[in-house]
Image: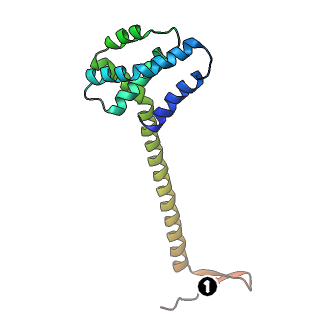
Amino acid sequence: MDGEDKINLLAHLIPRFGSGDPEQEAALQAFVTGMKPTFAHIRQQCPSFSESDVQLLGTEFLAAEVLKPKRSSREEFAKWLGAYNESELTAILDARKRPKTEAASQLQQFRDIRAAAKKKEEDDQEALKKQVDDARAERTMDFNARTGKFEKAEEKKK
């Protein structure tokens, strides 16, 4: 699992520690002891999954079903997990990853738009500078600050 997924898992786990509730303590124990068999089952069902994907899907399932007291027993969880086939597990994993993928895509689009806007601004500034330079080179009148009048520009020495 990547760092963000680990932090998400911790957000599920940490509030459940130290509650003093024996059912919650049993649920935490079931979560921990259920990790290896859950990961093994997912690996068996989906051999194409990376270890990161196996851990992500397994901990998500355990957090949703086992971590909450009285939601599912170990046996109920095992039956529930066993009912999924590879295509269903893949669809669940894809749905879990979709927001992050879409956010990364949108961030890249934003960066591309921002880079294009910056490039256009630089091009506009360069065109303005060229226009000013051309005007200076081709001007026929100059402002004389001493007299406060426009006068015919002197020919530039070449």
Work out whether residue 82 or residue 119 is closer to the camera in this orientation and state it: 82
Q: Quadrant of the N terminus?
A: top left
User: Picture quarter containing residue 153?
Assistant: bottom right
Q: Residue furthest bottom?
A: 157
- Residue 95 visible (yes or no): no
Work out whether residue 70 or residue 46 is closer to the camera in this orientation and state it: 70
Q: Give the labeled residue for mark 1.
A: 152
Residue 126, above or below 77: below
Residue 83: x and y in percent read 32, 10
Work out whether residue 38 or residue 135 is closer to the camera in this orientation and state it: 38
Residue 105, above or below 115: above
- Residue 121 visible (yes or no): yes
Q: Residue at x 72, y 83 (%)?
A: 145
Residue 20: x and y in percent read 62, 17
Residue 141: x and y in percent read 61, 80
Q: Residue at x 51, y 8 (%)?
A: 70
Left or right: 36 in relation to 4: left
Residue 34: x and y in percent read 40, 19
Q: Secondary structure at mark 1?
A: strand
Residue 145, above or below 31: below
Q: Residue at x 41, y 11 (%)?
A: 74
Q: Residue at x 46, y 14 (%)?
A: 65
> Which amino acid, mark 1?
Lys
Work out whether residue 141 or residue 3 is closer to the camera in this orientation and state it: 3
